[in-house]
């Protein structure tokens, strides 16, 4: 029996995850689902954003379908109780260091893209974001000097093993796509980035067939808008990947369209799958959220953790067909509710 942990979380997380679950159920794959609280929902029910029972459910499952975390009612809480700590805690506890964020323009979404149609049509890339290091996991602190000046700090650090393992995933993915890898850093300013670049260059000797380029993150942000078609696989650090993928999502039509897979190994065992968007508290409970990113995350779950490529392709084709037929939530310029969009994808599932 295959068990999927459903960690729907906060805000629009439960709404979009429910649609992804409907699609998985419709495929008749003999899956069992186990729900657990996470984020603000877990904090209010159990006093912690990642309670031990939730971590147990996540560890036991064959894969995790995650919604989103974040709740403005938690903004004033001590950092360890903030909802976002739940997803960071899961990534650390499960060793999920490789975050695959595919950005593709689905047919018919040119009008939703922030780019000109002829430029938007070129978008077909994977942003590979390192997930266990960088400022997210470095030493953090806040202090007040004797003169009363407040100071906050988050240490950015990477060691060479951390860089090498994500770079290996980047090269392996590039080999399976177009043999093109762009490593994004800020090596003209940051020591971490200089190490990043050195390690990636050393590893490139093992992958002579892959054309490796390097780009500073500021230039990459500009190039993503100017000429996104030049990118195929981008490998980058935690912070840069977080920012660049949100930017890429608007080039591909909406942040509601981008799924992700967080993996602990290239094979993808025990992965976590989530839309790249957050909990969007401003539209929570209104049926306005686009469930496509969550549904496409379910497709990635089938592909990477359950080795069900055919079923994954079915879901992706159904999302495509629904969009071609004109299905649109408000973020894409339409009026469909979250569950109507789910209906449209289900109707297209053959
Ligand atoms: N589904 C994505 C999500 O919940 N994002 C909220 C968040 O706190 N993300 C932190 C991160 O992705 O590093």
Image (cartoon, grey):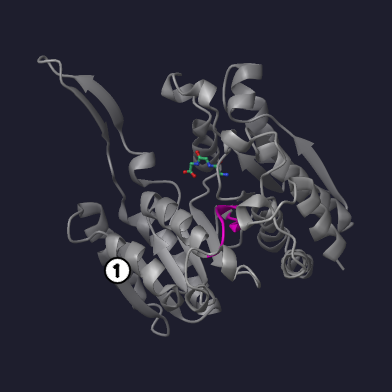
Image vertical order of residue 282 relative to residue 323, above or below: above
Residue at x-position 87% and y-position 55%: 26
Q: Is residue 3 visible?
A: no
Give the x, y percent position of residue 57.
70, 35
Give the x, y percent position of residue 312.
74, 65
**Residue 120 part of the magenta-drawn span:** no
Residue at x-position 53% and y-position 21%: 73
Residue at x-position 38% and y-position 84%: 208
**Residue 254 part of the magenta-drawn span:** yes
Q: Quick one: label 1, few (<14), some, or many (20+) residues within 10 Å?
A: some
Image vertical order of residue 123 relative to residue 37, above or below: below
Ligand 1 under 8 Å from disc 1 Cβ: no
By secondary structure, the bulk of the magenta-drawn segment is best described as loop
Residue for badge 1: 215
Quarter holding residue 10? top right
The residue lying furthest to the left in this view is 147
Q: Left or right: 160 with respect to 224?
A: left
Q: Is residue 301 visible?
A: yes
Q: Secondary structure at mark 1?
A: strand
Q: Nearer the viewer, residue 22 or 55?
A: 22
Residue at x-position 65% and y-position 43%: 66
Q: Nearer the viewer, residue 167 or 223?
A: 223
Give the x, y percent position of residue 34.
78, 37
Q: Quadrant of the C terminus?
A: bottom right
Q: Left or right: 90 with respect to 115?
A: right
Q: Nearer the viewer, residue 248 or 9?
A: 248
Magenta region, residue range:
252-260
């Amino acid at each position: 029996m295959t068990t999927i942990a459903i960690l729907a979380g906060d805000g629009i997380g439960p709404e979009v995850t429910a649609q992804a679950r409907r699609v998985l159920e419709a495929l008749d794959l003999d899956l069992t689902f186990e729900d657990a609280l996470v984020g603000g929902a877990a904090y209010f029910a159990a006093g912690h954003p990642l309670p031990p029972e939730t971590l147990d459910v996540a560890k036991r499952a064959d894969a995790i379908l995650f919604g989103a975390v974040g709740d403005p009612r938690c903004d004033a809480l001590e950092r360890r109780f903030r909802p976002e700590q739940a997803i960071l805690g899961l990534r650390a506890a499960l060793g999920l260091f490789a975050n695959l964020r595919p950005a593709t323009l689905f047919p018919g979404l040119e009008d939703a893209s922030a780019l000109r149609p002829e430029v938007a049509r070129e978008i077909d890339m994977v942003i590979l974001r390192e997930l266990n290091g960088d400022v997210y996991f470095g030493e953090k602190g806040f202090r007040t000097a004797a003169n009363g000046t407040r100071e906050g700090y988050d240490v950015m650090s990477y060691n060479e093993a951390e860089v090498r393992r994500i770079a290996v995933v980047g090269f392996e993915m590039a080999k399976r796509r177009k043999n093109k890898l762009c490593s994004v850093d800020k090596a003209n300013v940051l020591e971490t980035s200089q190490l990043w670049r050195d390690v990636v260059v050393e590893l490139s000797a093992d992958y002579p067939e892959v054309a490796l380029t390097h780009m500073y993150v500021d230039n990459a942000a500009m190039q993503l808008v100017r000429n996104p078609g030049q990118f195929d696989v981008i490998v980058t650090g935690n912070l840069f990947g977080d920012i660049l993928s949100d930017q890429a999502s608007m080039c591909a039509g909406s942040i509601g369209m981008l799924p992700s897979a967080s993996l602990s190994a290239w094979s993808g065992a025990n992965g976590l799958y989530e839309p790249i968007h957050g909990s969007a508290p401003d539209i929570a409970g209104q049926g306005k959220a686009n469930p496509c990113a969550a549904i496409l995350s379910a497709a990635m779950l089938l592909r990477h953790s359950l080795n069900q490529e055919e079923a994954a392709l079915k879901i992706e084709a159904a999302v495509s067909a629904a969009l071609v037929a004109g299905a649109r939530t408000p973020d894409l310029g339409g009026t469909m509710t979250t569950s109507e969009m789910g209906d449209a994808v289900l109707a297209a599932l053959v």
